[in-house]
Image (cartoon, rainbow, N blue to C red):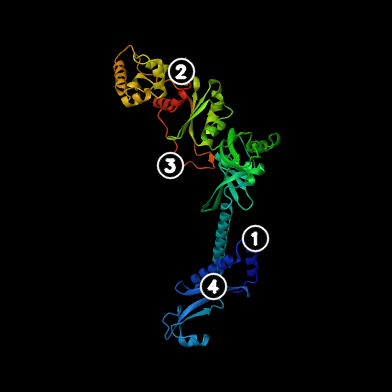
Amino acid sequence: MNFSELGRVIEQLGKDRGIKKEFIVGAIEQAFLVTARKKFGIQGEYEARYNENDGEVEIFQYKNVVEKVRDGIVEIDFDSAKKLDEDCEVGDQLGLKIENPGFSRVDIQTAKQIIFQKVRDAERDILFAEFKHREGDLVTGIARRFEKGNVVIDLGKSDAILPKKEIIFGESFKPGDRIQAYLSDVIMTNRGPEIRLTRTSPMFLVKLFEVEVPEIADGTIEVKAAAREPGYRAKIAVMTTDRDIDPVGACVGMKGSRVQNIVNELQGEKIDIVRWNDDTETFARAALAPAEIQSVSLNHGDHTLDVIVEDDQLSLAIGKRGQNVRLAAMLTGWKINIISKAKLQERVKLAVENLVQLSNISEATAQVLVQKGVMSIVDLSASAPEDISRYLGKSVDDAKVMIETAAAALEDENIKSDLDENAEIISASAVPNQSGFKRSERAEGTSAPAKKDAGGDKFSEAERRLREELAAFKLK
């Protein structure tokens, strides 16, 4: 079978579509092999070979050499085989070239369909491998059309999908717009590779900084964490080991030029750039900027930070609609409770007043007990004598008397035995979610805190974590 332009077609396909010549030749051979089996019978054994020198696809039929033929499709008699190959013997398998296969137009069409399908599959595999390798990169394309709110973007060799939920709130596109996005995922589907983009991921912010700040691109400055509420506000933490470089200043740029370019790309999203610190308390203070933090208490057990601020700093620490504390939680990877110092002091004052109702407890003794987490007569009555003895430096017998007095007071209607558990001391709370980016992973074995019920226990837990802090408060 002679195809005068078959060689040129193979070369052109390989050049235009980036498919290896060997693959195209293999697709052609397989296509004509399937066609030959369909025409001459599937019980026969056939082979298709592309002859590059002659530009032919040659079809060979293999037959077994036998003394007496029973099936002419798969067997050939010894005398006939001897004429074709003098060295053959009975039991050998002889390949016979079919000089004129006589393929019909339908046969040729079937072969073409197989070849085109093989080429399409190869193209899909090539595109998948190329874009899979580019996962995590910034890409730029042209908006072509809209499908159910999603933007279809032309990247040159393939289309990509920018889902509606991955578009920054408030921004809109029209066909022909140039769009920059972060290539988040490439998956293979029945229709070929699906390339998914995002403009809301914290990694989009990180990659924009890599483009705008050469020191990040060359590794002098490292982005350690990033958090976003797309279209509204973002925080990014940076560090460097070069003492001569200010990582925050380098990211801001001369007169804010570098960060302003990023703000413009993100539709006016406000960006806070903070200095990373391995010390969690120091980093938490920076993450909650511009609020001034009074103190930070860490609880490694449930991965929680209790942050105490003055009343005039509460709004800054919490932020508009809670943005500041949420972003700080994502940036640090810790749950953050914002606690009013005035409310905490008032709570401690009430706790001391509750305890001094007992005749054998002085104000100084009550303050010591409160510092140890004994916040009311009820707490005292439920305490172990050994603990009270250790807290106050008294004998176990004296501690027992004190506990018995507290237990008796529970029956006295004139004594208020417990505090008002509805008095909140936590002004705001935020739990880190998965939308933040953090370079250093959380220490092994440390898990995110579980949500607590909205009852009074969460307040007493916070008070116990802050008992060391309470000692510094002056009660009036």
Q: Is residue 422 above or below residue 48?
A: above
* Disc assigned to residue 187: none
Mark 1, other Cα within 10 Å: few <14 / some 14–19 / many ≥20: few
- In terms of sequence position, does the residue under pointer 3 or pointer 4 come before the other? 4
- Return the mark for residue 48: 4
Measured as percent of width and height from the top left, residue 159 is found at 60, 49
Evaluate if marks 3 and 1 touch, with contact meaning CB atoms under 8 Å apart.
no
Q: Are marks 3 and 4 in contact (CB under 8 Å)?
A: no
Q: Secondary structure at mark 1?
A: helix
* Mark 2 nearby-residue class (10 Å; few <14, some 14–19, many ≥20): some
User: Quick one: SS at disc 4?
Assistant: strand
Q: Amino acid at mark 3?
A: Gly
Location of the N terminus (image quadrant):
bottom right
On the image, numbered disc 3 is attached to which residue?
445
The CA span between labels 4 and 2 is 91 Å
Task: Give the foreground label among 3 and 4.
Answer: 3
Residue underneath mark 2: 346
Q: Residues within 10 Å of mark 3 (few under 14, many from 20)?
A: few
Find out whether the residues at labels 3 and 2 contact each other: C-beta distance under 8 Å: no
Where does residue 360 sit, x and y in percent of width and height?
A: 34, 15
Q: CA distance from mark 4 to mark 1?
A: 25 Å
Disc on the earlier residue, 4 or 1: 1
CB atoms at circles 4 and 2 under 8 Å apart?
no
Quick check: 231 above or below 190?
A: above
Q: Amino acid at mark 2?
A: Glu
- Left or right, 224 with respect to 254, comes to left
Mark sitting on residue 16? 1
